[in-house]
Image: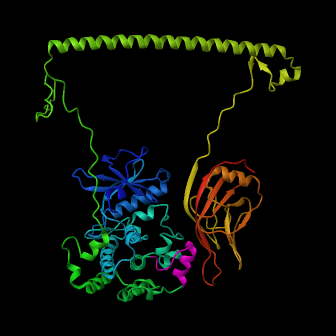
Amino acid sequence: MNSATEVFEPLHAEDPQTVAGYRLAARLGAGGMGRVYLSHTPGGRPVAIKVVRPELAEDPAFRRRFRREVVAARRVRGAYTAEVIDADADAVPPWLATLYVPGPSLSEAVARRGALPVPAVLWLMAGVAEALQAIHAEGIVHRDLKPSNVLLASDGPRVIDFGISTASDTTGPTATGSTIGTPQYMAPEQALAGETTAATDVFALGQTAAFAALGEPLYGTGPSMTVLFRIVHSTPDLTRLPEELQPLLARCLAANPEDRATPTEIVEWCRKQLGEDADDTSGGGPAIWREVLGPEVVVPDPAPTPTAPTAAPGPYPAPHPGSAHVTPVVWGPQPITPEERRKRGRRAAVIITTLTVIGTLMVGSLVWLLVDAARKVREEEAAAAAAAASRTPGPAASRSGAPGSTTGGKAATPSPTPSQPPKAIPFPMMRLDDEQSSITLGDRDTRTDRNGDIRLSCTEVTCKLESDTSKIIMLYGEPHGSLDACRMMLEHTTTRSWTLAGAAAGSEFCIVNKAGDVALLVIQIKSTVEVPGLAKWITADMTLWRQAMPAS
């Protein structure tokens, strides 16, 4: 974050120049929902424009969620939030604009300098807790609070993507039985697909603050299910944290949501610990906070707008080299001298002559092409007639109109027409559990019975995907993620079940049903550990290609 070149990336050839009148100045990055660009309001204030990915924009359910969450998020007004100032859920593609925060994310700051000192962590927690107060006041639960969603401005942190995260396919729709969030920062009730409340965000704040103080996630790293198991079934080791932070983080990370501190209590506790520094805003915050931020980020100027020609032709003399004279900008028609009129006449004559020659050549070329094409057609017809005359088809073939017979001198066999390739249809965050659910390929909602194309079945030892009618196979090695890979593998298998013992987050399964619909199932979260009282379930992203293989 030491220079603009580390923050801002030039626009690529495939990037738009404008979005709904906002001229784009640079790329800021990409996320689960789409690409993010830097732009400016008409008054010059920098904004972040988030443009939704095309495959999400084609999903009506996503648009409904996006529209609902944007309406709620635009009501949030807080000193420590990045305000949503403009959006259009019905545009193609949908987009939204938030105020741009010129500072690194918490994850970037920790990656650059390591763990933050205690005063900076307290300053961070107070600001994020105040942001949660504003967000919760509008009936919104963030559900995906994490270090990358906390930006560090010179006067304190800013929380971004509040509410909007529930519309993104990376976190899934808000529905019963769906998990929403990033595994390392989930609360226990999220990991078990339970009810999420304001206390869920407090747990995530505790984990985010612990990350800032330790320089790494409190519950460790590894496969998603391993981390989730620790969150649900273990007590965090707070002894690794600075002693000053342990009492507050213990309350934030309580397993029971009712036992957690409220955002108001967190703000009061942090201000008490900070003492006089809590009110120090000289120079944009305490010195320790400015040290964490590093050099100030210089925001590029607004993208230039197209301008009219700077000067019209006129009888002005060229300025002498080195002189201070500048040719004035002249708008509107100017007097035309006789010499200028003669020059324009000569230019017009040259242009007319050139166009006449080009037109003659083009007409001649077109006539030659038509004559040549007609000649080739006549030659092909003559060759076909000679070939037909040399054949002696039997009476049966002539009467039946079988391939090779003719009717009225014309071939009866139609020309084949190429078929369109199947279209990939995304179905994010589908859920299967070991009770009463299944998935029918092509349906966006999980069934509440076991009669779909595929279901989850578990024993005391392991779980497996199984089906009565569909073929299933797992893809090994590097992720394939393509229709061709699934076709090739499914063509040579007859299995209708597959154990999940060797599967993890990111594992891919190909499925084809009797109608020939092919699906690629990518596991996102897997909870199949044999623990008493712990439900067994998986969530997976599914991509579907309809009628991509012959029906069986």
Highlighted magenta segment, given as a residue range: 216-233
Q: Is residue 127 left or right of residue 359?
A: left
Residue 313 vs residue 187, the one in the foreground: 313
- Residue in the image at 35% along x and 58% along y: 7
Q: Is residue 149 left or right of residue 480?
A: left
Q: Position of residue 465 (x, y in %)?
A: 69, 67
Residue 306 vs residue 79, the one in the foreground: 306
In which quadrant of the rendered view does residue 435 lie?
A: bottom right
Q: Position of residue 126 (x, y in %)?
A: 30, 78
Q: Position of residue 455 (x, y in %)?
A: 67, 66
Q: Is residue 255 left or right of residue 408?
A: left
Residue 270 vs residue 254, the one in the foreground: 270
Q: Position of residue 349 (x, y in %)?
A: 30, 10
In which quadrant of the rendered view does residue 526 lie?
A: bottom right
Q: Is residue 364 left or right of residue 75?
A: right
Is 426 magenta? The answer is no
- Inspect this view and state whether residue 408 appears: no
In the image, residue 97 above or below residue 417 = below
Is 226 magenta? The answer is yes
- Residue in the image at 67% along x and 58% along y: 510
> Which image quarter holds the N terminus?
bottom left
